[in-house]
Image (cartoon, rainbow, N blue to C red):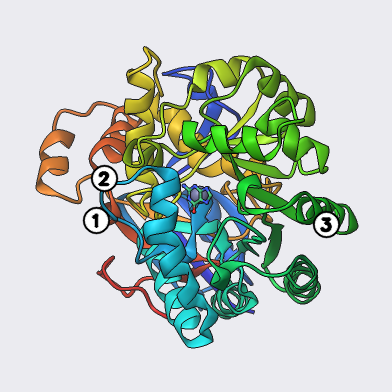
Amino acid sequence: MTRRAIRGRLLTFTRAPRGAGDAQSYRSIDDGIVLVENSRIAAVGPAAEIAARIPPDVPVERHPGALIMPGFIDPHIHYPQTQVIASYGAQLLEWLEKYTFVEEQKFADPGHAARNAEFFLDELARNGTTTACAYCTAHPASAEALFVAAHKRNAGMIAGNAVMSRNGPPGLLAPAASAIADSRDLIRRWHGTGRQRYAVTPRFAITSTDAQLAELGALLKEFPTTLMQTHLDENLGEIAAIKKLFPADPSYTAVYGRFGLLGPRSLMGHCIHLTDDEITLLRDTRSVAVFCPTSNLFIGSGLFDYQRLNAAGIRIALATDVGGGTSYSMLRTAAEAYKVMQLQGQNLPALAAFDLMTRRNAAAIGLEGEIGAIVPGAYADLVVLDARATPAMAHRMETVRDLEEELFVLMTLGDDRAVRQTYIAGEPALKLGSARSATT
Ligand code: GUN
Ligand code: ZN
């Protein structure tokens, strides 16, 4: 049995904060220990209580001055876009054609996919992200490469090949039958293998025919524990194209609804330009709206109206959307979420942001209790954060008075440099003393 004890200041959320200062929404322990046994948390509590239960041969790793939290969860990211990130000067449909589809075609080569999968997982670990919902390309070799690499690391990934059958280059389009057969094969081999899970992934309604969307809906029904991920109401040009392609449907959201693609396991990326009817449809189906602020600003898509969706009772998650998004860091993502909300006269308290990146994102992808919290039984996926990681952060920390202010410094000024260590299933993922390179 592999055992390890991780000691330091612990923080985990127990429910959604009702606003700034809601100290009942989390549990923090100034000097705590997480006892790990076989990938999972066996016990957690104050060091004074737990220390006596640790056998003498179990190593104790100490993180003085740092904050140990559940690893971040990124519920919308594209692993084939690590060489698309930072592509200049285009809005969504042009950006897809000019940069994204070009890079994604390279994933027909399994060697290219394998190299990118390793890079992607290293980069997530460097940023403290321990689980992600990743779009792959239409080539089954791309999802295969990511699953193989994640399984080897015992990292819990959710992935699916982004199925397309029209409005893209021939190199990304698969005939409907083979795309579905490939997805089914990936589900059979990987969904539930170790920590891996599959997400049925229509890229977006523009790139699938009615027939393909219907088959994807049927696939979701056939494997009801899989997730579904796609894009929705991101960009006005996209919405105009949807109106032309699906003239009989009352809305973009209704298109997905018609094919059985909405539901509590459906992750709808962006959700910026929703009508009231679409909001009702998302709420009634318990679908998740995924807020991707760095992407929405970078691609110029618009401002996610958090307050409107939250008030309507829609489940919300927070994600990077790399490579439309501009950072792998969930801390940078929270900082941009804050600014997007400020522009609309709304606030994102630090407590709410960290709850979103951990517990709420876990709940959004159906993994509450497994990840996203430091509780017995959960996987020991942890991030160790240092709010004094840079001179500017250390200087600002001199005037910080409490945990909430520290969290706000972390999300406003922090990035990968603030990640001192990342544990995946209890194993350190970063070489000691360096957040710059991940172990493979
Ligand atoms: N809509 C369809 N495909 C994509 C993609 O790759 N990125 C983003 N941001 N939106 C999309
Ligand atoms: Zn996306």
Identity, as a three-letter code, of the amino acid under mark 3: Glu
Identity, as a three-letter code, of the amino acid under mark 2: Gly
Left or right position of 112 against 54: left
Callout 1: SS: helix
Q: Residues at badges 1 and 2 in contact (C-beta under 8 Å)?
A: yes
Neighbor class of circle 2 (other Cα within 10 Å; few <14, some 14-19, many 20+) is many
Q: Nearer the viewer, residue 386 or 319?
A: 319
Q: Position of residue 348 (x, y in %)?
A: 41, 24
Q: From this viewpoint, is residue 317 visible?
A: no
Left or right position of 294 against 382: left
Work out whether mark 3 precedes mark 1 in sequence or the reverse, and give the earlier one: 3
Tell me the residue at 18%/36% (across/down). 397
Callout 2: SS: loop
Q: Nearer the viewer, residue 26 or 108?
A: 108
Q: Position of residue 228 (x, y in %)?
A: 71, 50
Q: Is mark 3 within 8 Å of ligand 1?
A: no
Label 1: which residue?
A: 417
